[in-house]
Amino acid sequence: MSNINKAFQQKDPSGKPRSAFIGFLTGGDPSMEKSEEFVLEMIRAGADLVEIGVPFSDPIAEGPVIQEANIRALSAGATVEKLFGLVKSLRSKTDVPLVFLTYLNPVFHYGYDPFFKRARDAGLDGIIIPDLPFEEQPEVRESASKYGVDIISLIAPTSEARIKEIAKAATGYIYLVSSMGVTGVRSEIKTDLGSIIAALRETTKIPVAVGFGIHTPAQAAEIGKIADGVIVGSAIVKIIAEHGADAGNHVYEYVRRMKIAVAGE
């Protein structure tokens, strides 16, 4: 069983499956040491899986909050190699699944085989590459599979005609984008997520986690009722932007509230 599956094996006190909470932050914002502290605070608050953004100069899927975090991290000296070091250090302290969110250029530049070998050695469980089209996945999947790293497929609200094709090849979990556009908090989510999730479940048993725009406990609770996981990124990154190196307790308190909402407690 992939280590990622552990995130989706949560059950409530009555034994019923419980949606997972997935937190995101940008690695190296404001420093690698603080990123490690904040990831551990998320896990202490109940995060079942953590996505770590690899800072990139042209993050096409990211809104202003994460774009600015990328700039802060790159200015502070973040590199792919240091991100691997962060994962390795975290892996010595926790077995909670860890996933990179990055773009294809850094992976291509590092070299597919060396990148995924390094990922495996560090203890990384999966990778999300928003600018990697489904049709181009095979060239990356060969190396990722060789070293046991799951490629997390993104499905957008416009992907309906391709849902079954993408779902059949999915590993780890499916990242269902709640709304069109870039990352960032949204006051409401109008996409018919229930219908998309139902279509996915006709094709695959891979867990479906919903992200993009979720930031309130009410939103998390609603989506937690229909999805296997709820992903929150920009709201956490915004807390880090506001409090900097002192964000630890604030991250913990926010993730704790969201985890309780997702779990329906």
Image: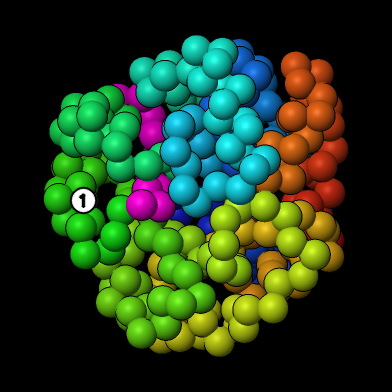
Q: Is residue 118 above or below residue 99?
A: above
Which is more toward the observer, 251 or 212? 212
Q: Where is residue 171 in the image (x, y as percent from the top left)?
A: 33, 59
Is any part of residue 202 visible from this angle? yes
Q: What element carries label 1?
A: helix
Q: In this view, does 251 lie to the left or right of 172?
A: right
Q: In this view, does 125 lie above or below 182?
A: above
Which is more toward the observer, 141 or 29? 29
- The image quadrant of residue 190 is bottom right
**Magenta residue check for 130:** yes
Provide the residue designation for mark 1.
141
Q: Which amino acid does label 1 sit on?
A: Arg
Please give the name of the residue rendered at 51% of the width and 20% of the height, measured from the top-left corner: 74
Q: Is residue 69 left or right of residue 246?
A: left
Q: How many marks?
A: 1
**Magenta residue check for 64:** no
Q: Is residue 41 left or right of residue 176?
A: right
Q: In which quarter of the image is the C terminus?
A: bottom right
Query: What segment carries the magenta color?
Result: 120-131
Which is more toward the observer, 218 or 44? 218
Q: Is residue 13 left or right of residue 64?
A: right
Q: In this view, does 135 lie above or below 226?
A: above
Q: Position of residue 247 (x, y in %)?
A: 79, 25
Please give the name of the residue rendered at 14% of the width and 50% of the height, measured from the top-left corner: 139
Q: Position of residue 243 (x, y in %)?
A: 82, 25
Q: How crowded is mark 1: few (under 14 residues within 10 Å), some or many (20 or more)?
A: some
